[in-house]
Amino acid sequence: MIELDDVSYGYGSGTLLTGLSLTLAPGSFHFLTGPSGAGKTTLMKLCYGELIATHGAVRLFGQDAGAMTRDDVAMIRRRVGVVHQDCQFLDHMSLAENVALPLTVSGRAVDTGELSELLKWVGLDAQAGAHPPELSGGERQRAALARAVIMSPEVILADEPTGNVDWEMSLRLLTLLVELNRMGKTVLIATHDMHLIRSAKAQVQARVLRISNQRLHSAGADL
């Protein structure tokens, strides 16, 4: 599905990641850890074509990422839902409109019934008409997750989705991501929160990966 083979990436004259090999198989669940600045976000961007490796091969759904056209990348993005660390919304649009934006941009019709069900699933049906500045941090994160899955992607990449919320909300977000995995979605979560990873043990079988010294390592026993 998504494969990195001996991948390196650098900014300018420096190397951030080197010799990375990773396969995100259909239906798998991964946690990605490592110190700030280690390259977790960069690795995620390599996984959806936002960045191109400076060495090695990245294959996204069987296609060589380095040979993709802009249209190819746009099509890949429909198959990968991304929850960014800093979830950006358009403040002049309602929550429902923000969540549905990927459909609107791609020219697809918005099924109001399905949108309502999705908002209900993340517990935001009562806030559908609210605007982003009116939302709490936890509500914004759940809205970001809803927006990431509105196109029914096969892969969910979540970059520090619980970084700005309390513990109760962190567990709620984790539960939603586990539910997506049980529906067959591939999930990769970048997080500093080892408590969150331990809490996942009872819910899902997951692989824990760690970036350190520019390389990707297995962090020990799988969950």
Image (cartoon, helix red, strand yellow):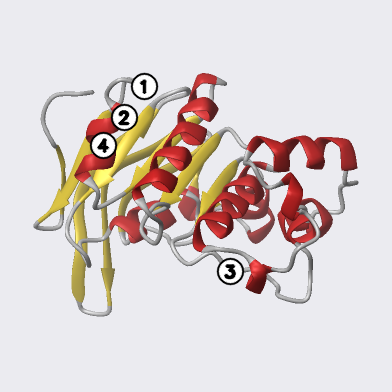
Could you tell me how many numbered marks the image carries?
4
**In the foreground, 155 or 14:** 155
Residue at image position (66%, 50%) is: 147
Residue at image position (71%, 75%) is: 91
Label annotation for residue 197: 4
Rounded to the nearest angstrom, the CA distance separating label 2 from label 1 is 5 Å
Note whether residue 12 is visible. yes
Residue at image position (48%, 35%) is: 177
Rounded to the nearest angstrom, the CA distance separating label 3 from label 1 is 29 Å
Q: Vertically, is 35 above or below 118?
A: below
Disc 2 marks which amino acid? Ala
Which quadrant is home to the C terminus?
Answer: top left
Label annotation for residue 166: none
Residue to which mark 3 is pinned: 88
Disc 4 marks which amino acid? Ile
Rounded to the nearest angstrom, the CA distance separating label 2 from label 3 is 27 Å
